[in-house]
Image: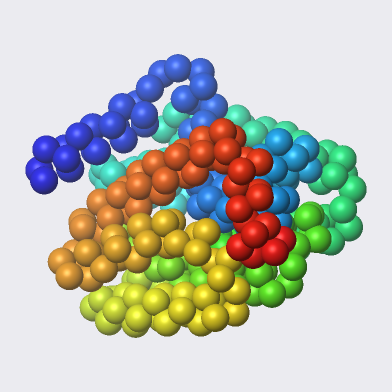
Amino acid sequence: MVDKIDRTLKNMQLLSNSKSSIAKFLRIQRSVAALPLFIIYTVVGLYFTGFNFFHVPYLLGALAIYLLSGAVNGYNNIFDVEEDKLAISSGIAKANYLLKEFTLRQIKWNFILTSIALACVVFILGNLGFAVVYTITYALGIIYTKPIRLKNRPLIGTSFNTYGFSIFPILSCFFLFNGPLRATIAFSIATIFPTFASCLIAEIADREIDKKIGTRTTACWLGTRAKTVIKAVLVLSVAFYIVALFIDWVVILVTPFMGVIIYQVYKLYMDFTDKKADFTLLKIGANLSKVLFVYVIVVIILHETAAQLLTNIFNI
């Protein structure tokens, strides 16, 4: 077990410390933050398109997801400058702040260019419902950081993140592909609490930092009650997944991803510390990446067979 932990951390450090141009680009884009959105979008989008991975609007929608994530995170980096400096001066080694690597001007230009690219992709797609969802979500991402600073408000900040990582990509697919409302509701119900759990774990992992710099997240507000809340979220995750199954069996498509999150959250609950939360978050990300990679490869190879199978099972 120790060897596995050491190997995981070493791999993460290797990726974080790489000097290659592509690695630097991915870091300034905060590309890893787009992973949860990609997972939900991939599964729901492929189902709504009959498992047609090569559907052009599907690929453009995935690009829009990435660009919106990059833009919102870029804006967040701009207005976290003072907090980042305070964290660095406090000697918090695990803080992964872009000011160590990029100038504020570079971060601002990255945000501007990413936002312009996002607007272009949304315009090319030409879907009114999709454009409205992205406009609203982009605006929420802005006020989440500044000027209202919703990210520092307990429950509200976590709820906004939960929306962004679960409901938003599902709504994107619903409007872009004219997806069935019943399946959209089922996907939303099945994913909302596991996503909330992941967002809370991310806050728990950063709780030490947030306390030192004066950020009042949900995890800081909960304090010792965080473990109780995690237990409640675990129960609700399972309960809502069962409800979602009764609404539409199609939610079995997201089961591998939800299973990874729920299992890792359960392990954290059984052995709860802030340091464990930090590693739990890494494990969730690593395992979700593996499942997504296999998922996409299978779809590329067997997309016609998968589409026929889905037609027979779900009558899409």
In the picture, measured across the screen, residue 229 lies left or right of residue 78, that is left
Q: Position of residue 18 (x, y in %)?
A: 38, 22
Q: Is residue 34 visible?
A: yes
**For residue 142, what is the image quadrant?**
bottom right
* 222 is higher (above) or lower (below) than 263: below
How is this picture coloured? rainbow
Residue shown at 35%/47% (left/top)?
287
Residue shown at 42%/82% (left/top)?
239
Q: Position of residue 312 (x, y in %)?
A: 65, 59
In the picture, measured across the screen, residue 191 lies left or right of residue 308, that is left
Residue shown at 72%/61% (left/top)?
316
In the picture, measured across the screen, residue 296 lies left or right of residue 276, that is right
Q: Is residue 150 visible?
A: no
**For residue 249, what is the image quadrant?**
bottom right
Q: Residue reaching furthest left?
A: 2
Q: Residue reaching furthest front?
A: 312
**For residue 263, what is the image quadrant?**
bottom left
Q: Position of residue 44 (x, y in %)?
A: 63, 57
